Image (cartoon, helix red, strand yellow):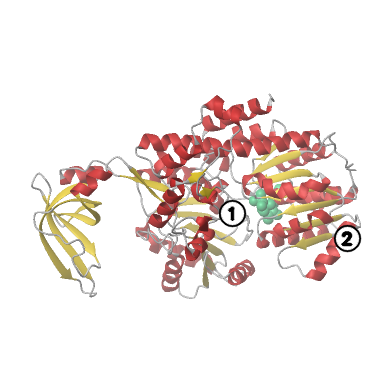
Amino acid sequence: MHTYKEYDDVGVIKGVGKKKVEQFNKKKVFTVSDLLKYYPRSYKVFEEPEKNYYDALKSGKPLIAVVSGTEKFERKSGKMVMKVICKDSEGNSFMATWFNFAYNPFGFTNGSILVLDGKCSQAYGYNFITHPQVYRISEYEELIGKPVPTYSQTAKLKTNIIHNAILEALSDVDVENSLPKEIIEKRNIPDMLELYNKEHNPNTIDELYEADNYLSYEELFLFMLELKKRQLGIKKEKNKYKFSSCLDVIKLHKSLPFELTKGQISTLSAIETDLNGETVSSRLVQGDVGSGKTIVAIFALLMAYNSGYQSVLLAPTEVLATQHYEEAIKLFEKADINCDVELVNGKTSKEDKDRITTKLANGKPLIVIGTHAVINMADEFTTLSILIIDEQHKFGVEQRETLAKKCKPHVINMTATPIPRTLTLALYGNGSVSEIRELPADRKPIRNCKITNEDFDKVFNFISKEVEKGRQAYFVCPVIEESEMDGLYEVDTIVSMIKKNCPGINVAGVHGKSDAKYRECVMQDYKNGDIDVLVSTTVIEVGVNVPNATVMVVVNAERFGLATLHQLRGRVGRGSEQSYCIFIDCLNSDKSQRRMEVITSTNSGFEISEADLRERGAGELLGTKQSGDWNFKKADIFNKELVKTVTEDVNWYLGVG
Ligand code: ADP
Ligand code: MG
């Protein structure tokens, strides 16, 4: 018997008290199992150090140094700079410098041999290494070759605390492999405990690779198995709804101020065919940001209403739900269509909820547009015929689970996030995936540009001019963890830079820590045009429609995945004015330059997802994970090999072709 069980509360772990439990919960770690699946965000590998300064300058690797003198000195601002004069093993001199140190923090003495891990650079004819990490040589030798994990941390929950809690759990825990035993045998999957150990505490890079491969296999297998089972189940559900074609659909079509695109039309006709099939359908609609998925959804909702049924459009946030609701009302009014539409979100009053549930329970035809809050009404629906899920990660599995249980509706998932075709085909099958490839004809292609942070001033000039013309702009900054302030711009910093450089402009900043009410007020003011420039972390929800916004500036663009950069760009170019997207690459490394090249060379999400695929080699493993777009902890759905293997295995296990 082991002390810890997988589904125990994380608080049972020795050394994890109440305060730490709170911190872990913030990171969505509630159980021992969650903790074991709290995988490192990256690893540091201690490489063999260089012996020569100039080699280190070239390779970026750590350097062995012999201390030959220390020196402190004060800058004008009153802050201290600490300098240590060193020689490499071949006698070349260089200077190690630290800023803001008022004392000798490492107890350097002449002649001590250290390993310095920092950035080498040359200036004014001198050799420097700035802000290096310092190791005693014996200490460093122990670390060579062993990947050391770093975790996504909070101010009160540092990497080493997380790591220690995980090691403690691993020392005495019962874990079971959740894969079916046939699969474990077929693929020779090692024991879970061994895999967790290799993931959190690898001795070599090879061990880490091994664990990584199996753990991503495990995650994708379990996910695909669930989804595939459901798809197969749906195929067996009889379609009990009869959809009649009706005049209102034609009226709505005629009243639109624009022509539907080819993709919109073919998607709609595929949906119509689905609705009248023998069995209940499940369709994935993929369309780039701004391709006009909402109107397709509204048509489907109208078809349900006119056939006398209830239907739901689910959006991930209140702002989006409200936006869809307003759009539907506006379109129906304009087309002179009588149709009952209700908005349901966290703010819906008890009276309104009662009124809506009464309608639902009485079997009245109704269109419900809303957030998660709709799920609480799941049992009240009597004729839910269509469920549309907009922009939900992981294919809206959980939402569908609850809402579809009783009425067995047709389900339509809509997404702008590029998903590799191999995966969508494996999950939905040919004929159940629709793509809206082209953007509406009146759009001017967004103009892209990449700059480095040296050219920040130019951005401010440009923004001032656009605002003068009456347009609006977004600035997006990365979410910053306390451990890594270097070279990153925070929301507040950008807000003050704009205030200073663009007098007279109304600017507001929001980030993850901002109060939800405040955030919503700011969003509303921005939509109304009372705020000219909005600075935020990625809290700008996917899909927000502010056609008057013409500039998107992504700060520290090197920190974002290609898919996210593309999503962010989709916030502009929604009206008929020329729009611009400026990517500020503050790292300007070979890799970031290559990625900026990809994103600025095309506006097509499909091309970007292809490029994304090529970008992600095995080398990505040690870097920051970007599959966050899909809420997978480990599985990389862009890994073709993995997707192929898992697809085959799921089909083999289920005994389907
Ligand atoms: P997304 O696919 O990102 O959800 P939306 O549905 O929000 O895109 O559409 C973006 C904008 O394009 C909306 O203002 C919508 O009214 C408009 N739109 C949709 N279809 C067309 C079309 N065929 N021609 C012109 N504009 C369109
Ligand atoms: Mg949308």
Q: Nearer the viewer, residue 363 or 23?
A: 23
Amino acid tagged 2: Lys
User: Along the horizontal axis of the image, is 156 left or right of 648?
Assistant: left
Check the image and report above or below for 325 versus 2: below
Which residue is rendered at x = 19% and y = 48% of the image?
137
Circle on res. 573: 1
Check the image and report above or below for 346 versus 227: below
Q: Nearer the viewer, residue 17 or 432?
A: 17
Q: Quadrant of the C terminus?
A: top right
Amino acid tagged 1: Gly
Label 2 or label 1, whichever comes before in sequence order: 2
> Which quarter of the figure has residue 370?
bottom right
Q: Residues within 10 Å of mark 2 (few under 14, many from 20)?
A: some
User: Along the horizontal axis of the image, is 374 left or right of 441?
Assistant: right
- Residue 379 in percent (x, y) is at 81, 54
- Residue 581 in percent (x, y) is at 50, 54
- Residue 47 in percent (x, y) is at 27, 42
Circle on res. 359: 2
State whether residue 591 appears in this view: yes
Q: Nearer the viewer, residue 550 or 178?
A: 178
- Residue 556 in percent (x, y) is at 42, 56
